[in-house]
Amino acid sequence: MTGAFYLMLKERTGHMNHTLGTEESIRRWDRFADRYAAVHTKDGDLHKEIFLNPTLLTLIGAVKGKKVLDAGCGEGYFSRILAGKGAEVTAVDFSRRMLEIAKERTASDLPIQFTYGNCEDLSTLQDKSFDVIVSNMVIQDLANYEKAFQEMHRLLVDRGEFIFSILHPCFVTPNSGWEKTATGEKLHWNVDHYFYEGVYEQQLGDEEKMLLFHRTLTSYISAVLETGFSLERLVEPTPSQEMLQKYPTFEEDFRCADFIVFKLKKKG
Ligand SMILES: C[S@@+](CC[C@H](N)C(=O)[O-])C[C@H]1O[C@@H](n2cnc3c(N)ncnc32)[C@H](O)[C@@H]1O
């Protein structure tokens, strides 16, 4: 995204914030769902295989016999991994097309209940009905993250755990990206507009511009603490040696972090 484009968007959002919220984000996810799912295998996409799955699975620990909510399940690969490990999974997404794909990809004998819903308001689900909630790369896609945190808190049993991953807000900001030489060599990663809080557009795939919502790291941490969670762990995932042998180009991910993962506990 160019600086000029970003500033135009910022100006527009001042007047049109209501049109660039969660509903518009989901309209775009509905349109993008098939192309998104096409790059997901049983381990998700490459970034999930390399960075997010090992981190999330370590932080979540044993799930056998536990009630787990996958909040924003997408095409469902992580729900299937958890169900394969013995969890009783409820998988929620606000994109109807994404949920259709998730159902098509899931064997009927896996214990996964797919449910349509918005993580900002999951009033169809009962208080204290989950031991663990996982939300993999969803919270930066919705407008009201404080409300989503309140819903996750309501749905967890006392001392239940909420583990979520997001784009790292210190490095992935409106207009961030590699500064390159004329021949394409990567010089350094540029960050700009860090203190901007709100919506911006990000090109995904060839055509679709998705909405992302940027907040500072302080805002995220303040919101989870104010909601009533304790912060148990923060992880900025890097590739393991095993993954680097398989995918050597990911060496550059030691230069800055793409993702951050929170492990929270509901005080009780
Ligand atoms: C980046 S994808 C991640 C999907 C899945 N968690 C994964 O790791 O493959 C984001 C997903 O969040 C869903 N989503 C976005 N906003 C949502 C909301 N407010 N409530 C529920 N799902 C939402 C989108 O439809 C999309 O499936």
Image (cartoon, helix red, strand yellow):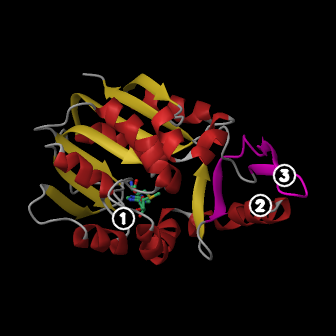
> Which of the two discs, 1 and 3, labels the residue nearer the N terminus?
1
Residue for badge 1: 94
Give the residue pinned by disc 2. 6
What is the magenta range?
Answer: 176-203
Give the SS element for disc 1: loop
Q: What residue type is labelled 3?
A: Lys
Q: In which quarter of the image is ligand 1?
A: bottom left
In the image, is residue 186 part of the stretch drawn in magenta? yes
Residue 104 point in image, percent of width and height: 24, 73
Q: How crowded is mark 3: few (under 14 residues within 10 Å), some or many (20 or more)?
A: few
Q: Is residue 170 magenta?
A: no
Which residue in the protein does label 3 denote? 180
Is 200 displayed left or right of 51 in the figure? right
Precedes in sequence: disc 1 or disc 2 = 2
Q: Earlier in the sequence, mark 3 or mark 2?
A: 2
Name the quarter where the C terminus is drawn.
top left
Residue 178, given in percent of the width and then of the height, sits at: 77, 50
